[in-house]
Each structure stands twice: as structure tokens, then as C-alpha cells.
Amino acid sequence: MNIKLLYFGRPRERLNISSETPEVPDNIATLGELLDWLRQRGGLWTQELAENRVRCALNQEMSKPDAPVRDGDEVAIFSPISGG
Amino acid sequence: MSISIQTADFDLAAELSALRGASMGAGALVSFVGLVRDFADDGKVQNIHLEHYPGMSEKALENIIVHASARWSLLGVRVIHRVGTLLPNDQIVLVATTSAHRADAFAACEFIMDYLKTSAPFWKKEQTGHGTRWLDTKESDVQRAQRWIDQGDMQ
């Protein structure tokens, strides 16, 4: 399946990527599994996407790791927010 | 209600005047302006860089205003959040509210600001003499937002 990934804040800068639409294995069912899959890219990906360093939004709603992901979803991965 | 996310600075007097003009029947106008601080944990701030999640940031701000409007009797709301590179003392954010009586305008303005801090997708990177640092969500901001839920009737 295809999932649109967006990156903001620290991971965007450190991984030097703003967006990508990778072919994600169909057995990936949740946001948490998607992050695990991305961490398998190794190196900086494992480090920057560590559980305590990133938060996620699924289709523009803040979401937890157990949220289900489907083909066509938009997933944003970012450091904790700090606006205002 | 009106929301803007922009790189340009804003004219506070003009914004408040426009909001007042659009709020017939108002007895109170409350505004908050957030500024870039010049001090950080590791020294003097040279500048900050702000980025946001286009699409979601507007929706998140709208959602916060919808909650505020359900909880207090508001006549108008204006929110401006700047992005891009800002210098110490620059204006970052404006939240302004109007209502028939001051209690609602005060409370809603503070509520919107507290929720903006903890649920709107903006990120700040601070540049000091020691390098750059992405700021984390402050625990004190999370607690301030939590207070509104603890007070009950959070809709």
C-alpha cells in the first residue's frame, strides 16, 4: 500500500526529508508498526524516530501508535510541537 | 472567527480595530501577543525559526476556536500565528477575543492560547551562540491546558 509521509521539525531537518510516498508492506497495520518499519532503515532513522523523540498525526489528527493505517493515508512524523 | 498563518508581521492596532468593528454588541475585547524571548537555557537567542504543518495547523486552530465558542459566549475571535525566521522581541502570535462581558473574553483568550501551545502543529528552532535547538513541548504548557479539562465541562 502507499502512504504519504510528511516530516516536520527535528526529524525533517536531521533526516533531510520533507515528504515521501513509499510502498509500505501490507502487513503494516498501525502507526506504531509503520514507525518500526521506518526505523529498520537504520542509522539516523533508528535514532531520530526513537519512540520518545517523535509524535504523529494521521490524516491531520494527532494520533497514538495504535491508530490503524490504510492505503492512501497521510501520516506526519514530527518532534514534539512548540508553537505560540 | 478569522485565522491567519503568515510570515509577515501584523499591525496590532489595525487587527484589534478590525475585530472591534466586526463585533457589534461587544463590551470587552481581550488580546494576547506572544513575543520572541531573547534568553534561552544556553544563552542569548539570536533568532528562532518557526515551521508548521500547512492544512493541519489551520484545522487545529479552527477546532480550538470551536471549543472556545461552545464554552463561552464570544462575538469574535482573531488568531494570527507567524512562521519563518523571527528575531528577539518580534511578535509571534496574536489571540484576540470579543464578548458582551469581560469574563468570557478573558477566559476564552487564555484557553485558546493554552490549547494552541499543546495541540497546534508548529515547531520552533532556537539559534543561540551555541548552535541550534528544536524546542520541546513544555510540561508547564501541558499542565496549563490540562487545567481547563480539570475545571470540567470540556466539550
Image (spheres, grey):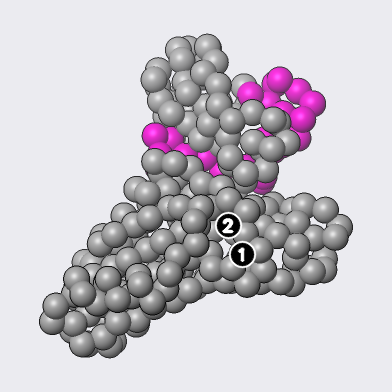
The foreground one among B7 and B58 is B7
Which of the chains bears the disc numbered 1? B
**Chain where mark 2 sits:** A
At which x and y percent is residue B97? 30, 74
Q: Which residues are magenta?
A: A38-61
Q: Secondary structure at mark 2?
A: loop
Q: Which residue is mark 1?
A: B138
Horizontal and vertical percent position of residue B113 = 44, 69
Disc 1/disc 2 C-alpha distance (Å):
8 Å
x 53%, y 64%: residue = B92
| Any part of residue B31 in sight | yes
| Residue at 27% from the left image edge and 71% from the top image edge | B18
Q: From the viewer's perspective, is the residue at label 1 or at label 2 nearer?
A: 2
Q: Quadrant of the N terminus of chain B?
A: bottom left
Q: Is residue A63 visible?
A: no
- Of residues B139 and B43, the one nearer the viewer is B43
Q: Name the element at disc 1.
A: loop
Rendered residue at 18%/82% (across/down): B26
Relative to residue A51, is residue B17 drawn left or right?
left
The quadrant of the rendering that contains the C terminus of chain B is bottom left
**Does the CB distance between marks 1 and 2 fall below 8 Å?**
yes
The answer to whether A61 is drawn above or below residue B129 in the figure is: above
Q: Is residue B5 left or right of residue B123?
A: left
Q: Which mark is residue A82?
A: 2
Quick one: label 2, few (<14), some, or many (20+) residues within 10 Å? many
Q: Residues within 10 Å of mark 1 (few under 14, many from 20)?
A: some
Taking the spot 68% from the left edge, 26% from the top edge, the residue there is A39
Q: Position of residue A25 (x, y in %)?
A: 53, 12
* Badge 1 amino acid: Lys
Q: x and y percent of residue A84 in the render?
A: 52, 63
The circle on residue A30 is none
- The kind of residue on which mark 2 rests is Ser
